[in-house]
Image: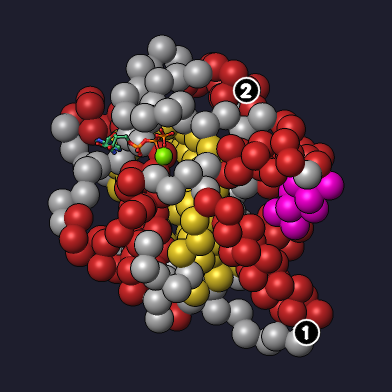
Amino acid sequence: MMMNSDLMLGYDYDIWYGYGLKQPLITDISTKTNSQTILCGMSGSGKSYAANILFAKICNASDSQGKVYFADFKQDDQFSYLQECPRYYSYNSSIEALEIVYDILHKRQSGEDKSRNPVTLIWDEYMANILAIQSIDKKKADEVMRKVSEILMLGRSLAVRLVISCQRPDASAFPSGSRLNYGIVLIVGAPIKSIYEMLIPKEYIDTIGDREFGVGEGVVLLQGSRLGFIKIPMVRDIEKMKQICIEALTR
Ligand SMILES: Nc1ncnc2c1ncn2[C@@H]1O[C@H](COP(=O)(O)OP(=O)(O)OP(=O)(O)O)[C@@H](O)[C@H]1O
Ligand SMILES: [Mg+2]
């Protein structure tokens, strides 16, 4: 039975293609589990589409009392419907969303804020955002990355979560091994060995074998130890999903 802190990420890839059956791939997103999330894959692999689905699912799970912030560095067409929402931060204002979420983390850590309602920052094209800041102001970029690292390390028990997407999570934007702080790792689209090597422990990479993933399909690693293969289905009712996300960035 699903608990309301369970999040369905998608369906088991092997069972979908092997038996034509839908077996949900589920993860816990309560504060008991690290639900810091990274979503990777090359351009067109379905990252933003998956981020949108995760967004709606997080809102539908136990987090209904929580707050979501959305940083859309690229201003992807997929997210244009969010533009009027108060907690939607596009392009150059994306760092404002990080500052707000970081501030909440600190207030909770210091005891000033005793609440633990879930706070989620969804950040599309994180890597491109960091590279853009690095090219203008290296110090600023370091500060941004330090804040991200702190959220990753301290966020779980304080109910502050990041969901970031990027194409390749190069070490330059993930200081001091912070790539390993993600409890939910999703890599979609064509298998790119170098991306796997950045995020998946060596001993699991062989298990991937010669699977060929298409758009919205790929590898999932939970808590650094549970490897699975995922099929993210297309959304049946896009308008309903959009409505859930708009409300979540507004209320
Ligand atoms: N799970 C899916 N099932 C079927 N089609 C999908 C799925 N996810 C995405 N697509 C299709 O692939 C297209 C590209 O997806 P998306 O924009 O999410 O890619 P992306 O990885 O974010 O690319 P970019 O890095 O260029 O932003 C979508 O417009 C959609 O039509
Ligand atoms: Mg995208």
Quarter of the picture holding the N terminus: bottom left
**Tag 2 residue:** 197
Picture residue at 58% right of the left edge, 59% below the top = 93
**Tag 1 residue:** 111
Q: Amino acid at mark 1?
A: Gly
- On the image, the x and y values in percent for residue 25 come to 37, 46
Q: How many marks?
A: 2
Picture residue at 68% right of the left edge, 66% below the top = 99
Q: Residues in magenta? A: 139-149
Residue 6 visible to the viewer: yes
Mark 1 lies on a secondary structure that is loop
Magenta stretch: residue 160 in it? no
- On the image, the x and y values in percent for residue 172 come to 74, 33
The one of 112 and 210 positioned closer to us in this rendering: 112
In the displayed structure image, the side of residue 134 where residue 53 appears, left or right: left
- On the image, the x and y values in percent for residue 238 come to 20, 55
In the displayed structure image, the side of residue 89 where residue 112 appears, left or right: right
Q: Amino acid at mark 2?
A: Glu
**Real-space Cα distance between discs 1 and 2?**
39 Å
Mark 2 lies on a secondary structure that is helix
Relative to 20, residue 194 above or below: above
Residue 180 visible to the viewer: no
Picture residue at 67% right of the left edge, 75% below the top = 104
Q: Work out whether mark 1 precedes mark 2 in sequence or the reverse, and give the earlier one.
A: 1
Magenta stretch: residue 147 in it? yes
